[in-house]
Structure formats: structure tokens, C-alpha cells
Amino acid sequence: MKHTDIKDILLTKDYISKSVTVCGWVRTARDSKNMAFLALNDGTTLNHLQIVIDKSSGIDFPTEAAKLGASLVVEGTVVENMNNQTPEINATKITVLGECPGDYPLQKKFQKLETLRESPHIRVRTNTFNAVFRVRSVMAAAIHRFFQERGYVYINTPLITGSDCEGAGEMFQVTTIGYSTEYKNKEEYYADDFFGKKAGLSVSGQMEGEVAAMGLGKIYTFGPSFRAENSNTLRHVAEFWHVEPEVAFAELPDIIELAEDMVKYILRDYMEKCPEELKFFEQRFEKGLTEKLENIVNNDFEVVDYTDAIELLKKADVKFEFPVEWGCDLQSEHERYITEQIYKKPVFLINYPKAIKSFYMKQNDDGKTVAATDLLVPGVGEIIGGSEREWDYDKLVNEMKARGMKLEDYKDYIDLRKYGSVPHGGFGLGFERMIMYATGMSNIRDVILYPRTVGNIR
Ligand code: 4AD
């Protein structure tokens, strides 16, 4: 259908006095005896275009055109509104494409995010979700640009896999047959399944990313990861988008530098390209958001040793729900205290105890810690997890054995340490968490089109 985007009409005065055709959904309607005013939105901008209908002009104005949510094609002349000088349209012809009955879920102007979650297919027609998804799109493009400009090769890693990268047993199983008592045991059942062995949805593209980096030097992946975590929190979903660079000839400080550069690049690009959306989030969701983002892009992130962080937490004048001791896995309340109360900025925590981290992380010389890092940010907590990888064959194999892992499931991965092994590392950014941080949206379910969480799929 030939038509003009509402964004273009509102952006300049170029269309004044011109005849145009626009399409959109009715956001508000005022209908009186002689005149009617519709606010039309086609999704191209957060702003609505006012359609003015002068009923005395003889225009055919069907009552269905004044219903919230109805979709219309409007022909008319662009004029300047006398009061606020914004362009609007004096309609000459209105066609209803799709009528919209009274049970349309967006009858009220402001709806709770919770209520909107019940209509994921309709909530995209609100300004909140328009802004979220536009920012998501701009940030995805920025991520690709960041890595492409630096010579990283974009790799698509498999989504179905035979090995659990994080070893945390949070994989969704992929099968074409249901388990039946006809099988003597699980092994027999898996052998009969599609791949002849147990398979699942990948929790991370890292293992295959390492394979690619060992030939291509610098790579990144950007795709979905799946985790069957039974955690009903504001920052976990079962299907999330994962950005994972992997770099050969790199150590932990190189990985930290890359992560900081990437986060700043994404935020700068977003602030430059989405001023309208940023203003909207500032007004509706997080006061001081712009200032927060400006501070982040203009200042260094903090790098703090896990051991030092534990000391700081122990001295803290607050009662945590989970007690803090060296060796404990930090809970969200601890992470947030570190980044929100102590440093008030993004913090890379480094050198975690070996026992609470994944098998593949490079073991430090102290024999107790690994060269891992998590990036913690105010408001959200962890948005990045990464590490230098153990590249010594014996150390890796011994660690896997100590954890009772089946070495044959990781043959390719171990081989990388056999044939020309090099220091290397990478990280994973949770894309939804990055969006939460950039927009001030506090629930991860509100930054993805269809959130998948425990007991929730449609
Ligand atoms: O810390 P994680 O588990 O690290 C890895 O998966 C590594 N293999 C990454 C790597 O080194 N290539 O996950 C990385 C990030 C987390 O910091 C978090 O932002 C996000 O992925 N994440 C989730 N996001 C939403 N919902 C979940 N259930 C998530 N689990 C992890």
C-alpha cells in the first residue's frame, strides 16, 4: 500500500499543504456533532498524528473509524495546527481497514505492565512497547556494528547440542520420543532417540565459539540461549538472547576492556539514535536515566577482586537475607549492594572461587580462584559473565574429572587444548538485561516480545 510514514510527516514541515495517504491505528478519538479528531499511530514514532474530520465537508465518516484500535487509511492535506504548530491532517477520505470491537484490551490510556503482559500480541501497540522494541532493534544493530568494526567474525553456533556448556544441568531436553517403560534404562532410551544420544537446547554458544575463535581469532555470536532454570525472578527468562565474543591470544584484562568498550558503545549509540525513547523512559520509568547513562559512558568501570568484595560485604551495615562468607555464590542482594551502595557504578568482579564457577575457567596460581569476571550494574545486577579459559590440557582434564564430567562428551573442546592451544577468553552478555539497564524497565518480561518463564508459554 502506498502511504507515508507518520514519523516523516511529523518530523519536518516539508509535507505542509501536500496531499498524503497515511495508515495507522486509532489511539484516541473525540467525536462531536460537526467535527471529529482522531489520534493515529502507525508504529513509526511514539507521537500520534492528529486527523481532523470536518463533517460539514461532506466526508463519509463511518462510526467504526472512531473506535479505539480500529485500523484506518486516511487521505487528506497536511496543515499546521494553529495552537502548537505541529503538522496534522484535514481528512478528505477515510477507509476502515479493520474494525475494533469494545473488548479491545487497550481501552484505558495507562495500563499496568502486569495487565499488558496478559496480551503480548496487543501490548506492542502501546508507546511503552513501541519504545522498548525500537531500542532493542537499535541496540542489536549497535552490537553487530561494534564487533564488525573491530574485525570480529559473526558466527552462528548450534542451538541443539550434546554438551551442557555451563554444566549446571539447566538444559531443556530435545527429543522426538517420549520415555517409556519399554526401555530398560535411560541410556537405551537415549540411544533410540533422534541423535542416538541425549541432546538439549544450548545454554551458551561458548564452546563452539571457542572452536571458531581457535581458527578465526576473534568471533562473536548473537543468538538465543535456553535455560530451564526454575527461578521466577525479575531478570530470568527461559529463552534469552546472548551476545558472546570469544578472543584468541587474550587474557582476562583484555576481556574486561572489550566488555567495557562494548557496553559504552551500545549506550552511546542508543542515546544518539533514540532521544525520543530515552526521554520517554526517563519520564515514565526511571528518573535520572539520562544522567545515569551519561555517567556510565564517561567514566571508568570499577574492577574489584571477589575476595575484597566479600570483606566489604561483611563490613556492610545491613542485614542480608543470605549470609556472606568467602566461597559463597553472591546473591542478587549482594551484587546490588556492591554496585548500588558501595561503588554506585558498573563493577567487574574478578577472581571468583573455583568451586562456584564453571569447569572451563582458567585456574589462578593460588589454586583457589579462577580468572572469571561478572559485570554488575546498578538496578539490574549481573549483565555479563565471562572468563579467561583454561587452556592447559592437563589442568582442564583434571578439573573435568574432579567434577565427574564425561570427557567423551567434550572431545572437540578438549582437543583445542591439544592442538596449538593458546590463551583465550570471552564473555556472555544477556541482551535483555542490557535493555533493562538502558531503559529502566524493571522486569525482563517487558523487554522481550514473548517471555518464556516457568509455567508460562503461549
Ligand atoms: O554467566 P553466564 O551463565 O555465562 C555463560 O553462559 C558463559 N558461557 C558466557 C561466555 O563466557 N561466553 O551467562 C551470561 C549472561 C549473564 O550475565 C546474564 O546476563 C545472561 O547471560 N543470562 C540470562 N539472561 C536472562 N535470563 C536467564 N535465565 C539468563 N541466564 C544468563
Image: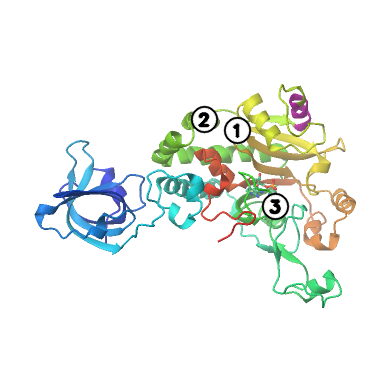
Q: What amino acid is found at the position of numbered circle 2 in the picture?
A: Lys
* Quadrant occupied by the N terminus: bottom left
119 to the left or right of 307: left
For residue 309: magenta? Answer: yes
Q: Report crowding for label 2: few under 14, some 14 to 19, many 20 or more residues within 10 A (C-alpha).
A: some
Q: What element carries label 2?
A: helix
| Residue 292 circle label | 2
| Residue 11 circle label | none
77 to the left or right of 403: left
Identity of the residue furthest to the bottom in this view: 182
What residue sits 68% from the left and 29% below the top? 338
Measured Cα–Cα span from mark 3 to mark 1: 23 Å
Mark 1: C-beta under 8 Å from nearest atom of ligand 1: no
Q: What element carries label 1?
A: loop
- Disc tally is 3
The residue carrying mark 1 is: 378
* Placement of 241 over or under 378, stated as above or below: below
Q: What amino acid is found at the position of numbered circle 1 in the picture?
A: Pro
Can you tell which of label 3 and label 2 is closer to the viewer? 3
* Placement of 363 over or under 20, stated as above or below: above
Q: Is mark 3 on a helix, strand or loop?
A: loop
What residue sits 66% from the left and 37% below the top? 375
The residue carrying mark 3 is: 229
Can you tell which of label 3 and label 1 is closer to the viewer? 3
The region drawn magenta spans 306-313
- Specify the principal SS of the magenta part: helix
- x and y percent of residue 359 in the render? 81, 49
Mark 3: C-beta under 8 Å from nearest atom of ligand 1: yes
